Amino acid sequence: MRLEMTKKSDLALKAMRCIGDAEGETMAGKLLADKLGITTHYLPQVISPLVKAGWISSTPGPRGGYRLLASLKDVSVLEVIEVIEGSIEDQGCVQRGIPCPEFDLCALHEPWQKARDAMLVELAAATIEASVRPCSEMT
């Protein structure tokens, strides 16, 4: 049984925080990639879903970069994870990896559902501002 988040979701959360920490300034892609410890070639894969969600603007060119459009108080950790990973509402059975058939529920079906529901509530309540370390504290 695994409860894990992908590296791409982790990077997206950190990118949102780093861009937000720039306090309205445009952050160059090279600087952001350096802060995240990734290449500038991989950065668009992390940022593009955040741009499509309307949370970040992207300006191309040598004077371009990324700027936060949303408030870090208003975007939840769950929202970012789902923008990157897709909906986690129906990820399936803890045992089988697919939704349990109604006629053959797994032994942990009910407690697992309750645990998942509680996790989703917590992630939805966790804002980036309150939950993601400031960019200056990231290693």
Image (tube, helix red, strand yellow):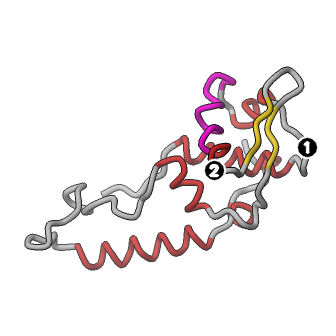
Which numbered tag is attached to residue 25? 1
Q: Amino acid at mark 1?
A: Glu
Left or right of 11 in this view: 7: left
Mark 2 and mark 1: Cα distance apart in space? 19 Å
Residue stretch rendered in magenta on the structure:
39-49
Is 43 one of the magenta-colored residues? yes
Mark in front: 2 vs 1: 2
Is 137 one of the magenta-colored residues? no
* Residue at figure coordinates x 81%, y 32% from the top left: 65
Residue 78 placement: quadrant: bottom right
Crowdedness near tag 2: few (<14), some (14–19) or many (≥20) residues, C-alpha within 10 Å: some
Q: Amino acid at mark 2?
A: Ala
Secondary structure of residue under mark 2: loop
Place of residue 57 in the rendered image (x, y in percent of width and height, measured from the top left): 76, 42
Quadrant of image for the C terminus: top right
Q: Is residue 31 above or below residue 78?
A: above
Q: Are marks 2 and 1 in contact (CB under 8 Å)?
A: no
The one of 54 and 72 positioned closer to us in this rendering: 54
Name the residue carrying label 2: 53
* Residue at figure coordinates x 23%, y 56% from the top left: 98
Lower position in the chain sequence, tag 2 or tag 1:
1
